[in-house]
Image: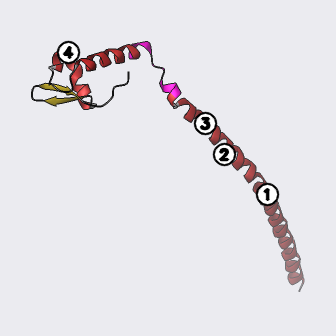
Amino acid sequence: MKQHALNGYHEQIAAAIRTTLALLDDAQTAKKAERVPAVLSDALALDATRRHKRKASSSEESRKYYPAATRKQRKQSAALLAKVSTDTPTDAGRLLGKRVGSFVRRGYLLKVDGGYLRTAKAFTP
């Protein structure tokens, strides 16, 4: 009988401990739930600034500025492409040298039997 009474007493203590732990767990869960919207809004704000910076760096305005050597090379390429006719085949290999292949691959020149023809694709230096 005494053993049975002690067993009941310890069961009540264990139930009280379980209840206390559950309450603590609920309180921590509630605190986390309160923090989640703030954390999400901070993360969304950081992501928005990241996307804005990325968009600004890849805009058309930033692509207009090339190094001087690149601008010079593009002007030379435009001058060479202007010498190739759109009607009669030209021996562009003599004019352009090894670079003729890159103009053919990119669609600025078309290889025909008598040489190369200039296509309608616009070249922007």
Give the number of the mark in front: 1 or 4.
4
Which quadrant does the C terminus fall into?
Answer: top left
Residues at discs 3 and 4 in contact (Cβ within 8 Å): no
Between residue 121 and residue 61, name the one nearer to us: 121
Q: Earlier in the sequence, mark 1 or mark 4?
A: 1
The quadrant where residue 124 appears: top left
| CA distance separating discs 2 and 4 | 55 Å
Residue at image coords 67%, 45%: 43
Q: Which of marks 1 and 2 is nearer the N terminus?
A: 1
Residues at discs 2 and 3 in contact (Cβ within 8 Å): no
Estimate the x, y position of residue 72 in percent, counting from the top left: 37, 13
Q: Earlier in the sequence, mark 3 or mark 4?
A: 3
Q: Name the residue under label 4.
A: 95
| CA distance separating discs 2 and 3 | 12 Å
Q: Is residue 27 magenta?
A: no
Estimate the x, y position of residue 53 in percent, counting from the top left: 59, 33
Q: Name the residue under label 1.
A: 28
Q: Which amino acid does label 4 sit on?
A: Leu
Left or right of 29 in this view: 68: left
Span of residues in magenta: 61-70
